[in-house]
Amino acid sequence: MNHPNQELLSALYTAFQRLDAPAMARCYAEDAEFQDPVFHLRGRREIGGMWAMLCDAVRQKGRDVWALEFSIGAADDLRGSAHWEPRYRFSATGRMVHNIIDAEFEFKDGLIQRHRDHFSFWRWSRQALGPIGLVLGWTPVLAGKVKSQAQANLQRYLASHR
């Protein structure tokens, strides 16, 4: 039998396969934290908003190519892990991306308290941004610009979906 937190992680990624952001948000504690090379978010509202923004972008500009594969690693009452690989069209450029992500989780009261995704920003930027990502994707300047734009997009999205 799987640990309940393995089931929770499976529910998170299964919901993402279906582009069901509300179901994804329910997997997180109210005061959860999320971090990856682009976002650093606090609270279910921001985290759920990010997933909703990404799901909406896929539905609007890339449902035809959307795919997500995942595997759930070990999980116990406190910690867990997963590996996931989304394939999608990056909405800003229309370029295809195959990202490879390893995730670490901390749990509290049967929900995700902390979620940290690890992936190569340079690999992602080469695919998503093309030549500029190839040349500048390893630099802090491009990473900072992408982070700023993503955060601004999320704040606009949250403001328009109150």
Image (cartoon, rainbow, N blue to C red):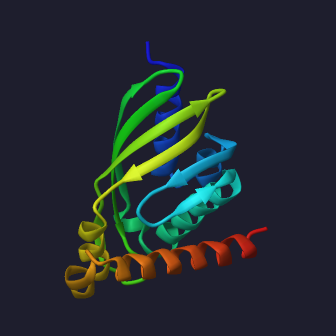
Residue drawn at the location 47% of the way across and 21% of the way down: 76
Q: Which residue lies most toward the bottom here? A: 132
Residue 37 on image: x %, y %:
41, 63
Q: Is residue 91 visible?
A: no
Q: Nearer the viewer, residue 42 or 94?
A: 42
Q: Would you say 6 lies left or right of 94 here?
A: right
Quarter in which the N terminus is drawn = top left
Q: Which residue lies most toward the front here? A: 140
Quarter in which the C terminus is drawn = bottom right
Q: Would you say 43 lies left or right of 20 here?
A: right
Q: Is residue 1 visible?
A: yes
Corner quadrant of residue 139 = bottom left
Residue 80 on image: x %, y %:
44, 31
Corner quadrant of residue 140 = bottom left
Q: Is residue 162 above or below residue 118?
A: below
Q: Is residue 122 above or below residue 70?
A: below
Q: Is residue 40 above or below residue 10?
A: below
Q: Would you say 36 lies left or right of 96 here?
A: right
Q: Which residue lies most toward the top here? A: 1
Q: Nearer the viewer, residue 115 or 2?
A: 115
Q: Is residue 135 above or below residue 41?
A: below
Residue drawn at the location 49% of the way across and 55% of the way down: 35
